[in-house]
Amino acid sequence: MAGQVAATPTFALTPSSERTPTAQNYIINFDFLNQYLPDTYEKEFERYGNRTISSFLRMVGAEMPTNSDLIKWAEQGRLHTKYTSVGTAAAQFADQAVFQVNDVLDPATAEQVIRVGQTIVVVQNDGSGMNKAVVSAVDNTAGGRGQFTADFYEGGGLVTAGTAVGNADVTVFIYGSEFKKGTAGMVGSLEANDLIFDNKPIIIKDTYNVSGSDMAQIGWVEVTTEDGATGYLWYLKSEHETRLRFDDYLETAMIEAVPAEQNSGAAAILGSSGAAANPGAGSDGIFYAVEQRGNIWSGGNPTTLADFDSIISRLDKQGAIEENVLFVDRQFAFDIDDMLAAQNSYGAGGTSYGLFDNDEEMALNLGFSGFRRGYDFYKTDWKYLNDPTMRGDLPTNTGSGKVNGLLVPAGSTSVYDQILGKNAKRPFLHVRYRASETEDRRYKTWITGSAGGAATSDIDNMQVNFLSERAVCTLGANNFFIFNQ
């Protein structure tokens, strides 16, 4: 029988943050009739190590200001044209055929871009054959519904009969043009087609409140936090942990944010009207943007080279970015290690792959930091996906919403920045925060009350306030991959 991790004792999910002091925070035994003094450890033991989970956006992105409720950017469209839903009613062996482009959203009004004189490849969608042809006539009127006439180069004519102009019989793409001697030039020109995307910032807040008396209360525990706060005043720990939580939320909100759907409860409570001045509640987080505009792998992790070949094939059809980083959970990291180890002819033994001298006293490294297959893939653990208080330990059944990893293209892309009024280089992922000459909302913190140096009210407390207003811009989401369960 295979061994397994025992169900109990398990990991704790109970937060250490409480609204009031607890028995775990202070000594409760003040029995002076007991003459024996306990031996105490004053310093807290950091049983969970570094508990913060932020750093992802700092690794792959940048931050820059914005001064609007709406952020818009343009991304380049395709340079060449290919239609995959083209119908014809022509008979087999016909020397000429009339085709109708059905890919456009409304063939009755939208124009296709094929022009007279262009040469095209016509591929039967059932795989029965291929033709090459030159376009002899184009009808973009409403009545013609985006039709064009093509004359085939092959003497045998159309390889397979069509069914109807409204069907998806063939795929057509343009590969050039050809004209007779002494004829006029190309009729009509094409305008560049950009894809316009937008996002809106959200306001993130937190606060910490302590009474003046508790600020003067000494504790027996020497507290410490990940950002270096130390001392015997418990409020220092609570204030710093509030700040650490807020820092984490600044990142996780950018990862998880979703726009509020129309007539949803969130849209109602957040006062979203959908008007230009109030574009809506919520925001497009990274996961949402990739699931809507990017690539999705589902049904478990890719565990074989054949799986990654299908991922690479999709990347070929997108931006073909040379270097990519895989941010993965622990199981996905193991699956990649096992897949790469299996490529070694001695992989079954599990000890010989990699650059080792097989020294008996050498620590065996069973992990890989990356690999190259068509593109460079670098692998790194993402703490956010492993932390049991966040996305770690979610149900693993399909459809549970569990995310196993995210593929992020490295480098930057060129976009038109409306603030600058010109093309600018931007990281594929970057954060825009609200700021102007008089107000910077990237990371605001201020103190109110009458304690701790504050003198803004007669309330005997100190309240530390945190605020940020920001959105994440996922540029070129078609180059990202999200790995869902």
Image (cartoon, helix red, strand yellow):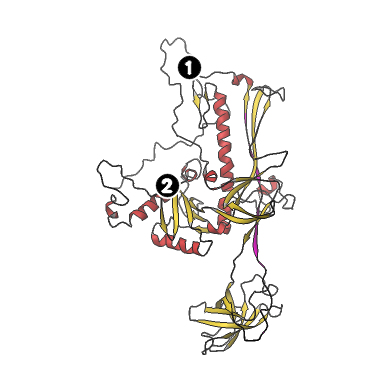
Check residue 1 for magenta coloring. no
Residue 163 appears anywhere in the view: no
Relative to 320, say whether 34 is above or below.
above
Q: Which residue is mark 1?
A: 29
Q: Which residue is mark 2?
A: 330
**Left or right: where 301 falls relative to 467:** left
Image position, residue 272 (x, y; %)? 71, 49
Relative to 412, say whether 465 is above or below.
above
Looking at the rendered structure, the kind of residue marked 1 is Asn
Q: Residue furthest left?
A: 360
Residue 195 appears anywhere in the view: yes
Q: Quadrant of residue 37?
A: top left
Q: Which residues are magenta?
A: 182-208
Residue at 49% x, 22% y: name it.
222
Secondary element at tag 2: helix
Image position, residue 134 (x, y; %)? 59, 83
Mark 2 and mark 1: span between their CA atoms?
43 Å
Q: Residue furthest front?
A: 182
| Circle on res. 387 | none
Disc 2 packing (10 Å; few <14; some 14–19; many ≥20): some
Looking at the rendered structure, the kind of residue marked 2 is Arg
Q: Quadrant of residue 310?
A: bottom left
Secondary element at tag 1: loop
Check residue 202 for magenta coloring. yes
Relative to 12, say whether 107 is above or below.
below
**Left or right: where 366 falls relative to 59:** left
Closest to the observer: 190 or 474? 190
**Left or right: where 18 falls relative to 141:** left
Image position, residue 421 (x, y; %)? 70, 54
Closest to the observer: 125 or 60? 60
Residue at 56% x, 28% y: name it.
238
Residue at 27% x, 55% y: name it.
346
